[in-house]
Image (tube, rainbow, N blue to C red):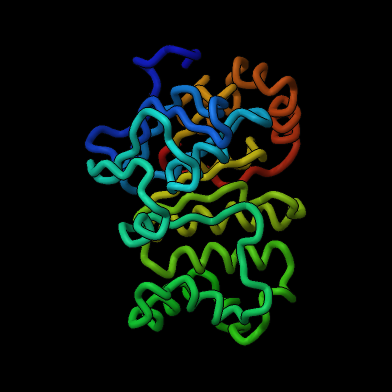
């Protein structure tokens, strides 16, 4: 889908009412300076969608605008048809939206278990039930529950951050560059965890610089450029789209070339 082709904006999306939707979002950090310039996004129940694009395209800003961390100047965000534009992040958590930031995403002085307790602070009576749920997804958490988060590797910290966001039983999970700074092996583990979370019934929006791996696991993807939607479609189609490769100025092309010489993550059932 070309920039401005609004009729094809959500190509490949399933029918029915979206779970989460953003329409014509304009947002930024400084007065008079917009990072998002009319951005759109649709997430349906059960989907895993990816947001990719060049540095400075507005990917993380879009995620933060969805979660109430960046002021939306115009446009709207809805959750299950309810307007949640600029709603406070703690209220969004209560409504079933989880968020994992790229940096500073664990409490290093606390144990793994204490980090997860912080995730369930709004519903402490659910802790045992939710701890069992995340431990089933990530067995290492239960085995090392007494270990301080500050002693964990980057990949292990990311696992704790994801688990903490799941403690409030979200229907939507927003992930901001979860593979950043990780080794290739740990990146693959992170993407596999992301898909495991999605298959457990959580709809996921993932922002990623690692475009190839993100598009591999996504049902659909959005490519942003200068705060606008440039392209969208099924993940694997975008990964091999010459126009998307051109937008990346060779970055994605190198990834696709590498993909032809090595194993890929198994495809999703829908893309």
How far across and how far down the image is residue 182, in percent? 74, 54
How far across and how far down the image is residue 76, in percent? 33, 33
Residue extending farthest bottom = 146
Which residue is nearer to you in this view: 132 or 56?
Answer: 56
| 230 in relation to 136, above or below | above
Give the residue displayed 52% in from the left and 20% down from the top: 230
| 11 in relation to 99, above or below | above
How far across and how far down the image is residue 99, in percent? 48, 55
Quadrant including the C terminus? top left
How far across and how far down the image is residue 159, in percent? 59, 65
- Residue 20 placement: quadrant: top left
Q: Is residue 17 visible?
A: yes
| 8 in relation to 205, above or below | above
Which residue is nearer to you in this view: 73 or 17?
Answer: 73
Give the residue displayed 54% in from the left and 56% down from the top: 100
How many numbered marks, from 0 up? 0
Q: Is residue 203 left or right of residue 259?
A: left
| 13 in relation to 269, above or below | above
- Residue 256 placement: quadrant: top right
Q: Is residue 201 visible?
A: no
Which residue is nearer to you in this view: 97 or 11?
Answer: 97
Give the residue displayed 63% in from the left and 83% down from the top: 144
Q: Is residue 236 left or right of residue 167?
A: right
Give the residue displayed 70% in from the left and 35% down from the top: 259
- Residue 114 placement: quadrant: bottom right
């Amino acid at each position: 889908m070309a920039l401005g082709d609004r009729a094809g904006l959500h190509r490949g999306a399933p029918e029915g009412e979206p779970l989460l939707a953003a329409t014509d979002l304009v947002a930024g950090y400084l007065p008079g300076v917009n990072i998002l310039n009319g951005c759109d996004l649709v997430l349906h129940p059960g989907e895993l969608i990816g947001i990719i694009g060049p540095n400075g395209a507005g990917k993380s800003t879009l995620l933060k605008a969805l979660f109430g961390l960046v002021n939306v100047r115009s446009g709207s965000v809805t959750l299950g048809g309810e307007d949640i534009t600029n709603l406070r992040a703690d209220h969004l958590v209560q409504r079933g939206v989880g968020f994992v930031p790229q940096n500073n995403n664990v409490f290093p002085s606390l144990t793994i278990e204490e980090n997860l307790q912080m995730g369930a602070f709004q519903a402490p009576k659910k802790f045992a039930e939710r701890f069992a749920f995340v431990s089933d997804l990530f067995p290492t958490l239960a085995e090392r529950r007494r270990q301080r988060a500050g002693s964990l590797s980057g990949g292990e910290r990311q696992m704790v951050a994801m688990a903490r966001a799941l403690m409030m039983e979200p229907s939507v999970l927003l992930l901001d560059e979860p593979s950043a700074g990780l080794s290739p092996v740990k990146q693959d583990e992170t993407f596999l965890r992301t898909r495991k979370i999605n298959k457990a019934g959580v709809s996921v929006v993932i922002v990623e610089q690692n475009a190839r791996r993100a598009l591999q696991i996504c049902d659909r993807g959005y490519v942003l450029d200068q705060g606008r939607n440039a392209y969208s479609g099924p993940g694997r189609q975008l990964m091999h789209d010459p126009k998307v490769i051109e937008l990346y100025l060779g970055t994605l092309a190198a990834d696709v070339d590498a993909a032809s010489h090595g194993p890929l993550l198994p495809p999703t059932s829908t893309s």
